[in-house]
Image: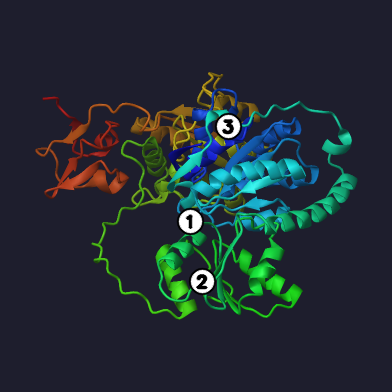
Amino acid sequence: MHKEFLMGNEAIGKACIAAGVNVVAGYPGTPSTEVLETIAKENDGSVYVEWSVNEKAALEVAAGASYSGARTLVTMKHVGLNVASDPLMSLEYVGVEGGMVVLVADDPGPISSQTEQDTRTFAEYSKVPCFDPSDAKEAYEMIFEAFELSEKYKTPVFMRPTTRVCHSYQSIDVRDYAEYEDHRPEGFVKDSKRWVIFPKLSYANHAKIEVRNEEISNEFSSNERNVITAGDVRKGIVAQGISYANVKDILDNSEGDKPALLKISTPFPFPEKLACEFLKGVDEILVVEELDPYIERHLLLVCGKYGINVKITGKLTGSVARSGENMPDLVQKYINEFMGWESAPCALPETPELPVRPPVLCAGCPHRASFYAVKKAMKGKETIFAGDIGCYTLGNAMPLDMVDTCLCMGAGLGIAQGVGRVKPDTKCFAFVGDSTFFASAITGVVNAVYNQADMTLVVLDNSTTAMTGHQPHPGTGHTMMGEFTDKIDIENILRGIGVETVVKQDPFKLDEAVETVKKVADEPGVKAIIFEAPCAVLFKPETPYEVDLDKCVDCKMCIREIGCPGVVLKDGHVAVDPALCNGCGLCSQICPCSAIGKAVKG
């Protein structure tokens, strides 16, 4: 063993390598992304790693490898679990051979997500065992236990780190190379009675799963991850994950009588026997957890089942917030109120008021030019702009104001079709990025063509998966393993589906782009525009632009129209920030006075 200072996701990735993982598949999504990237970077080439086109595909690839005896890891964020849920629900009934860990990173807050889903609740719903680490160190150690449990009971297993576990750093004892496990799969063994899911098999396996989960519950009750710390009074606190770390830190630094503390690190199957032991030693309990009142409900169930008279407070009683993160200051407040402690006076100075910095598209982002071209072309017409998940969701911000709806990945296509059915005279646009197109939009295009919708698909092709860190996708021509592959052409896919009008356009040729939008949008049926321009982060900036103050009339149209962070006010006049400008030239095409041009090199 040796020590390394690691991010939580790095620790998980390194643990998977040390545990002998053979196949890793996933789809990028904050806060999970670095797990797969760590494995791709750190392994010696013996581990197969792929960014799959979506989470459903990733889980199915891993299922096939697990059927063949391989240890597999699937990575995603919590909303990605929705996409993977179809195969996962059936896989739990079928089972696996090699250990399978399904890493689902939850995002309390949410910090970078559409929802605050709680994977512990999904674990109970799907009957899949779940591990819930409280810090990076525990996440590292849990991976080995998760693979072992998966193989012992022939079931996929959830690993549920949250954002603060995924992205925090800690000094961790990690295994040396000589301590790595060498897992060699035997290959797929044909057995249709095991691998082909039929109602009779599902019924029989469901009964076995219920018995098995009772056994795992008992096993989790004696698991060293679930810890009871004795207290000085007949009050207790129950916590999990990063909430436990916050509670423990507060109690360790508090004076006077302290409550008993129960840590739940394996929430499903719930460690019922351990909970009974804890409940019998207290009269009142506070539950601090993220996000659902999952533990709180189970404790209430245990009290009712075993006739234990304990007052339980938490989210259900309003003692703990029902949404958002359990930040340390909030946890301190909950504990103070529960214990009757006086709030400690704040010794920290007041923080200065921070400037408001809303998220915006990068300077030189091609999506800004694409949105602006469509906006200008459709000026004065009744339109709807259905957005999607990605950097381009930021097109909703003023002054662009070009995202009317955003639901989930690929949904913009269906929403545009639905609006069009209700308001046939509305010009319906659906925007989708190139990575999202492959992940979840193709089905929507097929539906539109099949049902003869009238809509315009706008593919914002910036040659990468930009929002989550520039991962490759089927249109980039290379894989996560570093192999070169044929680029899958979006235009060919659209034409193959039956979209007859497909036009490629450079969004930075503004006048040309506006005319393209006008022409294509007026055609009947399903049509598509592919705006092609690389992400501004991917290429070396061109010569920056500058403002000729002799020509500028301070109309500020360049600022009011596109909101580029590279165009600023300096000493009351419009200026271009050379540190941000990458020379895209969009502002110069908007300026009515021709006052913006490329900077002259001195």
Q: Amino acid at mark 1?
A: Pro
Q: Which residue is mark 3?
A: 179
Q: Is residue 122 above or below residue 142?
A: below
The answer to whether residue 599 is left or right of residue 422 is left
Q: Quadrant of residue 599?
A: top left
Q: Earlier in the sequence, mark 3 or mark 2?
A: 3
Residue 397 x/y as whole percent = 38, 51
State the SS at label 2: loop
Quadrant that contains the C terminus = top left
Q: Which residue is mark 1?
A: 110
Residue 131 x/y as whole percent = 62, 51
Residue 310 x/y as whole percent = 64, 79
Q: Earlier in the sequence, mark 2 or mark 1?
A: 1
**Residue in front for this viewpoint, 176 or 29:** 176
Q: CA distance from mark 3 to mark 1?
A: 38 Å
Q: Residue at x 75, y 74 (%)?
A: 306
Estimate how packed mark 2 is, as few (under 14), some (14 to 19) or many (20 or more) residues with alpha carbons within 10 Å. many
Single out the mark in the foreground, 3 or 1. Answer: 3
Residue 244 x/y as whole percent = 51, 61
Which label sits on residue 320?
Answer: 2
